[in-house]
Structures are given as C-alpha cells and as structure tokens.
Image (cartoon, grey):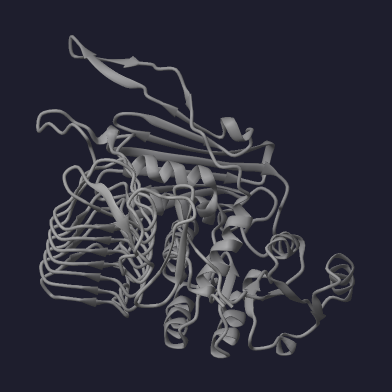
Amino acid sequence: MSQSQPAISVALVGFGPWGRNIARNLDALGALALVCDPDPLSQALARKQYPNAQVVAARDEIPRDLAVAIAAPAAQHAELAEHFLLRGQHVFVEKPLALHVDECPPLIALARQKRCVLMVGHLLQYHPAVHKLDALIRQGALGRLLYFYSNRLNLGRIRREENSLWSFAPHDISVMLRLAGGMPSEVHATGGYFLHPKIADSTVTHLSWESGLRAHIYVSWLHPFKEQRLVVVGQDAMALFDDTLPLDQKLVLYRHGVDWKDGVPVPRKAEPEAVPLANDEPLRCEMQAFLDACAGTGGPLYTDGQEGMRVLRVLDAAEQSLTHGGVPVALADLPADRHAGVTIHPSAVVGEQAQIGAGSKIWHFSHIMDGAVIGRDCVVGQNGFVQSGAVLGNGVRLQNNVSVYDGVTLGDGVFCGPSCVFTNVTRPRATVSRRGEFSATPVGRGVTIGANATIVCGHSIGEFAFIGAGSVVTRDVPAHALVTGNPARVRGWVCACGEKLDLDAKPIPGGTAVCPRCADRWRHEGANLVREETT
C-alpha cells in the first residue's frame, strides 16, 4: 500500500474570540482534536460547537502527541510556548511571540534543539494579496522601492493590557519587513494619549532603511470608520492593498510615472489595474502552513520564530521612541545566531535577512541575497547564487555554478546539476531595463536538471521530471517526463525514484510499466503519468 503523510492533530489553547476563529479553521481542515480553556463558559461553548473535540481546563491534560496552537492572552505566550516545546510539541503562537525581545532567543533555540516547529501568527503574511504583492516586487514590476505606508484604523477593540501600537501594528511591520527584504536601521514613533495617560490610542511609526527606503504605519482605535490600507510606491509603479474592499478590488496596480519637462517633474498617470487574487481565507492558509510544517511537507515558514523576533525588535524600538517623545532609536545588529543550524563557508556572502532552514549548507564563494528563501537541509554548491526573490524548498541540491534568479521557485528535493542555467527575461538587452518583465519559473518537487541545461523563463516543470544534460527547455515540461535536446523534447518517462520507465514517449492509453528499481507500477491517463495503488 502506498505511504501517505500522517495527519496532524492540534490542541487549541485559548477559546476566546480569536481562538474561536482558529478553531473553526482547524476543524475545517480536519485537525482540531482538543480545546483547552480554564473558563467554564468557554468550555461549554467549545463542547457545543465541536462535539468531536476533547475539551479540557488545564494545559497538563493535553497529550504530548498533539501539535499546539496558542491563542491565550499575550502575556502568557512565551511561557506557554516554552512549556509545550520542552515537551517536544510543535507550537503555533498568536502574535506577539512574547512581550519582551529577550524572551525570543531561548524559545528559538529550544525549538531548534527539540526539532519542533515554532510559528508565529502574523496573519497578513498568508493573505493572497500580500503573496501577490511580494511576487510583483521580486519580479521588478514596481522597480526600486521608495516608500511604504499603512493605515490600520477603527473605532473599538480598545485594550488596557497593551497600546494601539502593540495591538494593531505587528501585522503591518511583519509585511513591511518581508517586502523590504531586511530590517530598518532606525525607528521613531509618536502617539496620542486620549483615554488613558499611559496607553497610546493612536501612534505613527516611521521606519528608515539604509537603502533610502522609508515607511510609516498609522494605527488608531479612535477613528470614525474602518480602514486597512497598505500602499507601496516604487520607481516604476505603485500598488494599493485595501483589505476592506471586495476580492477583485483588494490589490490594485498603478503604473504611474514622472516625466521631467524643462527641469520640472510632471506626473504621468495611468489607469488602475486590478490584480487577480486567489479566493483563499488567510487564516485557513496560515493554519494549513502550520500543519504542513508539522508534517514536514511544507516549504520554509514566512513567520517562524526568527521572524517573530524581528517584528518584536521593531516594536520594542518604536515603544522606546514613543516613551521618550519620538526620539529616533537605532536598531542594533541582528543576533549572532541568525543562521544558527546552517553551515556557511567563510568565503560565502549571506544576507542577514535571507531565510535559511536548519541543516542547510552554503559552500565556497556563494552569495545568498537578503529576501531569499531556502528551506531545510539544502545544499548550495561552490559559486552558487540565490537572488532575493527566489524560493528553494526543503532538500534542494544546487551543484557548483548555479544561479537561481527572482521568479524561480524550486520545490522540495529538486536537484540542479553543475552550471545549469535559469533565465528571468526572454529578450534581454544590456541597455534596456526588463525588471518589470521577469517571468515566473515554477519547478515541481523531485525534479532533476542535468549539467549545463538551460531553463528558459516562463515555463513550468512538473514534479519528478528529468531534464537531460545540456538540454534547452523552451516549453512546459509534464510531470515525470524525460526531456533532452535543443529544444528539449519528451523522450520518455521516469519514476519518482529516477529510473526510466518502459513507456513510449507519446502517451498511449492503457500503457503501463513497472519501475525496475522500486517496483512501483505506472500508467498513462491521457497525457498524465499516474502511479497505480498497490495493496
């Protein structure tokens, strides 16, 4: 019988208003096993809404074989996360990860020691609009980034255990750090105290990067209407993400520009372009990412413990500035263990804001840019290069002299032979900027790309395909296809283990083959190759 990934079951700690949203999504994903809350009324509600889930009052009643999602009050987050990590359980923590930055490194180290997932609930990172906006930036559609601003305003959700900065700003800070690809060098914040002399009801936080990029975040719970906007201004275009609008209007691109006439800048306006988005609930996507990470089937987490700590460092700097009347606060260098668990050769150059999973190895003279995402247990061979918008899954192998550019996404277990080439534009000219024309190149899991092969951008490669050495791929490659030549053409089919199957290059209905190595049986269904289930 074929092996399937074991299901992940989750215990939810905290059944308050937001915890109930998490419970709804975990239940829809078939993962909600238990609800823990000391309040009898919350327990009764949980039993009524989720009769198939166990309901307990104390954390020690939670079995050790469950992953844990924490939606308790923020003051309990760090202590609860430590408790469950010590027990060897995967942990999701609603934002913030902790209330103090110095509580984060021990949690990150503990998760690494126990080989557990530690994920932070920065919800906007899992919004389809943010994913698309990040992709547009990495593809160069906006040009060089100039500034961001966000407004997160409403009447209500007034807190007394935290100010509006800590209540509203973490999501926007998290997104801005992702889009910028690095930490700001300086933060300053000002606020208004209207309902309580020590709790700011509205704040404006300014962020500055050494590159010249600037941003501000305006939050308030004393505002006449709800507003949730993020504006990104680039040299070539501008984007607006308005989360209060319908899906087909949430993300809009403005290809405005500025022309100089007689030494005077003259705005050039363009019609807004709505950007299509997947109709996915962000919280559902976030919970699915947690389940995938626990099962070892997901890519690198956008919001791991390190990311949670970076957001807290910015919040802490903003709080210091707020307390001292808006004086600028410089951010210290990132902790020395930013890439703990990763082998980096002394000759390699690795950006502090690159995301690299534990167990990965970066070898001689390689360059990993800020913003690059590399999964667990990857190898980047000598003279490798991974650009800021590239994504490598888990277990990827780049042999010597391989460059992975913006727009290229490599699935888990992809093998790239020596000196194979990815392109990112189809008609390059040294004198013509093509950054707005970068094309996506998705490469499925388990693909093998032979030495000196060239993958022309804008084409997809199906999972477990095999690209022969020296081939030039100029069209989409089906899953499990063996392709060779210039241009590359389908010459046969390969098993997931890499062995060539005894099947004609052109699919023949009813054609079957048994892998000589692993004995898996394969057959054609139309143009697709499928594995037959065995008992």
Q: Classify 70 as above or below 66.
A: above
Taking depth in this image into account, of 463 and 152 the one nearest to the observer is: 463
Give the x, y percent position of residue 97: 54, 70
Whether residue 285 sits left or right of residue 466 in the image: it is: right
How many marks on residues? 0
Quadrant in which the N terminus appears: bottom right
**Occupied quadrant, residue 311:** bottom left
Residue at 33% x, 34% y: name it. 142
**Can residue 213 be seen?**
yes
Name, please, the residue furthest toward the top. 262
Residue 196 position within the rendered picture, expressed as x and y whole percent measured from the top left? 68, 55
Figure check: 69 above or below 445 = below
User: Quick check: 5 above or below 319?
Assistant: below
In the image, is 458 to the left or to the right of 428? right
Q: Position of residue 123 (x, y in %)?
A: 57, 56
Quarter occupied by residue 306 = bottom left
Q: Is residue 213 left or right of residue 66?
A: left
Residue 205 percent across, percent down from the top left: 46, 48
| Foreground residue among 331 and 322 | 331
